[in-house]
Structures are given as structure tokens and as C-alpha cells.
């Protein structure tokens, strides 16, 4: 079985075959010319880890709240992509790029690379991808346009009472609330004592994420355990005009 193949415009050398690891890992050395890389976003079970050896690669990866964001990585950068996330990798520079790619599990991904290299058309590649558990989702432009339409959403919860007591109760719920926020795409969180109680501020990718977190049964259970009654809470919700990260 050959150790080097061509998929689209990319040259793929199988540096470590999945057969040598019982299917757990496969390692590819990828050379991607300018304009190369999968043109469509996709997702699959396997975890990917990229180490850029030379040149520059653009990574389009699903982030918190489901929005796809673009980032660029140069030589020496290490970029992990969790299994199940919508993503693709492109060379949008004017020079070739090289990367070492680790895939886990690796067997299906290696079989796909070898089979897709024999495909006669993009439609055939899509069919091969489906057979090997790879879902082709949408174009990069569609994903970025959807991300641009999302309006960040700010929620404020004001708790009336003794600030020190409410801080203690807040800390009792912190682990559970952090898990709820993480699972629903929370972007930023802050809690602070105030002159008349306690303030919690959350920034979400969109209203739907905030509402889903509010319905999460873990949140209600944590508030009950901390004995924080709803009548002590005043809420505010606002669409965000601008977010600045220095």
C-alpha cells in the first residue's frame, strides 16, 4: 500500500499508518499549495491536531454557540480540532504550506484519504466521504454569513440581599453554572458584590443560547440548593451593539 497519495491539490504522505496503531492513530504529512484545501466545511468523529511546519494555513472551525470563525496559523503553531466540530482548512496564502496532521481514531480517515484520491469528480469525493463517516455541511461563505448575522446577547441578574452571603451562595453554584454556560456557548461571565446584593453578567453568542441555558435543569437545581429564591432576582436582557476584546 502506497505511503503517498494526492487528494485534490494536496499531497499526503502517510507518516504513520493506522494499521500500525490498531486504528487508534494516523499521522499525515500534508503539503498544500496556494488555494488548496477542502472547499466545503465538514465534520467527522475523528479528532485532528495540526502542527504547521511551513507556510500559513487558514482554519475555519465551529466555536462556542455553533458559529464558525476563521483563524490563521503559521510555522510552529499547533491547532487542535475536536471531533464533531464543523471545520475546514485552507491555504489562502500565496505560498505552499506544510503541516503534520494527527488523526484519532485514524482508520476511517486514512481509508477515506486513499479512496478519495481515486475519485473522478467532487461528487464522487462527497460520496466517498459519506461512506467513511464524513458529513459535508456547507460552504465557507455560508458559514461566515450566518456567523455575521448572529447578535451577541447580554444577560444581567441582580440579586438583592447581603453581598457576602450571596457571594458565598454564588461560589456554591459556580461549578455547575460554569458547566451550564460551557455547554450552551457562554462567551464571558462576571460576578460581583454590589451595594445592595450581587450582580451576575453573562455574554452569549445569541439569545437562543441564553434561553437554552435558562431552561437547563442543572441551573434550577443549583439555585434551589443554594436557597436563592426567584423573587430575590431581577433580570435584564439586551442585544449587544459591539464587543471589543483588547
Image (spheres, helix red, strand yellow):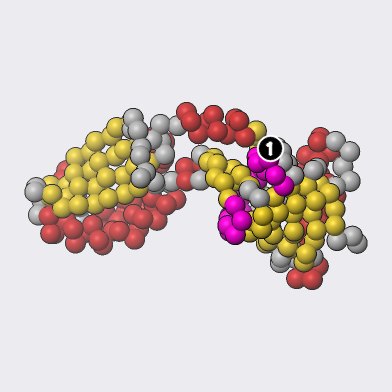
Which residue matches tag 1? 40
Q: Is residue 113 left or right of residue 61?
A: right
Label 1: how many Cα within 10 Å (few below 14, some 14–19, many 20+): some
> Relative to the observer, which residue lies in front, 133 or 232?
133
Residue 209 seen in this snapshot: yes
Q: Position of residue 13 (x, y in %)?
A: 80, 58
User: What residue sits 35% from the left and 33% below the top?
Assistant: 242
Q: Position of residue 157 (x, y in %)?
A: 23, 43
* Placement of the N terminus among the 4 image quadrants: bottom right
**Magenta segment, which residues?**
74-96
Judged left or right of residue 91, residue 143 is: left
Estimate the x, y position of residue 172 in percent, counting from the top left: 26, 62
Farthest residue, direction right = 1
The picture quadrant where one finds residue 86 is top right
Q: Is residue 75 above or below residue 60?
A: below
Residue, x 53% and y 41% (percent of image)? 69
Amino acid at each position: 500500500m502506497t505511503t503517498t497519495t494526492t487528494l485534490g491539490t494536496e499531497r499526503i504522505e502517510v507518516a504513520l499508518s493506522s494499521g500500525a496503531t490498531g486504528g487508534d492513530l494516523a499521522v499525515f504529512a500534508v503539503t498544500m499549495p496556494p488555494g488548496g484545501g477542502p472547499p466545503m466545511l465538514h465534520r467527522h468523529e475523528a479528532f485532528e491536531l495540526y502542527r504547521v511546519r511551513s507556510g500559513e494555513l487558514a482554519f475555519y472551525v465551529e466555536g462556542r454557540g455553533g458559529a464558525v470563525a476563521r483563524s490563521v496559523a503559521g510555522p510552529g503553531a499547533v491547532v487542535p480540532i475536536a471531533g464533531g466540530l464543523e471545520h475546514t482548512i485552507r491555504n489562502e496564502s500565496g505560498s505552499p504550506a506544510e503541516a503534520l496532521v494527527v488523526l484519532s481514531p485514524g482508520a476511517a480517515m486514512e481509508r477515506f484519504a486513499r479512496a478519495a484520491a481515486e475519485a473522478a469528480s467532487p461528487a464522487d469525493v462527497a460520496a466517498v466521504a459519506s461512506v467513511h463517516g464524513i458529513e459535508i455541511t456547507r460552504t465557507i461563505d455560508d458559514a461566515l454569513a450566518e456567523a455575521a448575522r448572529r447578535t451577541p446577547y447580554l444577560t444581567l441578574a441582580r440579586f438583592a440581599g447581603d453581598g457576602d452571603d450571596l457571594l458565598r451562595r454564588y461560589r456554591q453554584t459556580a461549578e455547575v453554572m460554569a458547566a451550564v454556560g460551557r455547554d450552551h456557548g457562554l462567551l464571558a461571565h462576571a460576578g460581583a458584590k454590589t451595594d445592595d446584593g450581587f450582580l451576575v453578567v453573562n455574554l452569549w453568542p445569541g439569545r437562543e443560547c441564553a434561553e437554552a441555558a435558562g431552561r437547563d435543569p442543572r441551573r434550577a437545581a443549583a439555585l434551589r440548593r443554594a436557597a436563592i429564591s426567584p423573587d430575590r432576582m431581577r433580570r435584564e436582557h439586551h442585544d449587544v451593539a459591539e464587543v471589543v476584546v483588547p
